Image: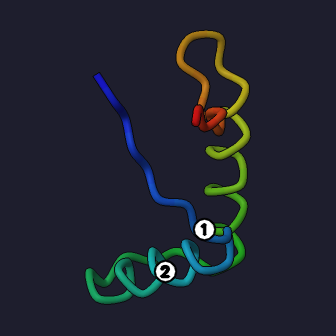
Amino acid sequence: MFKFYITASLKVRVNKRYDEYKKLNKKISFKDDYKSLKIRDKSDKERKYGPLKKQKILS
């Protein structure tokens, strides 16, 4: 099984999510959204099982 994910900078992802929240009339500040994604990224990379990390490309 393979897992693929596309990376984008934190700022790009926050802008996208913030715009989505605005369209849904959800009240969240850009700053709070930035903090939330930054914390989530850290926990995703440091979790014990299945941490998100770049894999070496075999040639």
**Could you tell whether 1 is left or right of 37 in the image?**
left
**Could you tell whether 36 is left or right of 46 in the image?**
left
Q: Are marks 1 and 2 in contact (CB under 8 Å)?
A: yes
Q: In the rendered image of this protein, does residue 41 appear above or below residue 51?
A: below
Q: Dot 1 corresponds to which residue? A: 33
Q: Dot 2 corresponds to which residue? A: 18
Q: In the rendered image of this protein, does residue 6 appear above or below residue 31?
A: above
Residue 57 horizontal/vertical position (percent): 60, 38
Q: Amino acid at mark 1?
A: Asp
Crowd class of label 2 (few under 14; some 14 to 19; many from 20; radius 10 Å): many
Q: In the rendered image of this protein, does residue 17 appear above or below residue 46?
A: below
Q: Secondary structure at mark 2?
A: helix
Tally of numbered tags: 2
Q: Residue at x 73, y 25 (%)?
A: 46
Quarter residue 25 falls in: bottom left
Q: Nearer the viewer, residue 25 or 36?
A: 36
Earlier-in-chain disc, 1 versus 2? 2
Disc number placed over residue 53 in the picture, else none: none
**Could you tell whether 2 is left or right of 48 in the image?**
left
Q: Residue at x 38, y 78 (%)?
A: 21
Q: Amino acid at mark 2?
A: Tyr
Q: In the rendered image of this protein, does residue 5 appear above or below residue 10?
A: above
Residue 6 horizontal/vertical position (percent): 47, 59
Residue 35 horizontal/vertical position (percent): 72, 60
Q: Residue at x 58, y 36 (%)?
A: 59
> What whole-number distance in Å separates the C-alpha atoms at marks 1 and 2?
7 Å
Q: Nearer the viewer, residue 26 or 58?
A: 58
Q: Secondary structure at mark 1?
A: helix
Looking at the image, what colour scheme do you see? rainbow
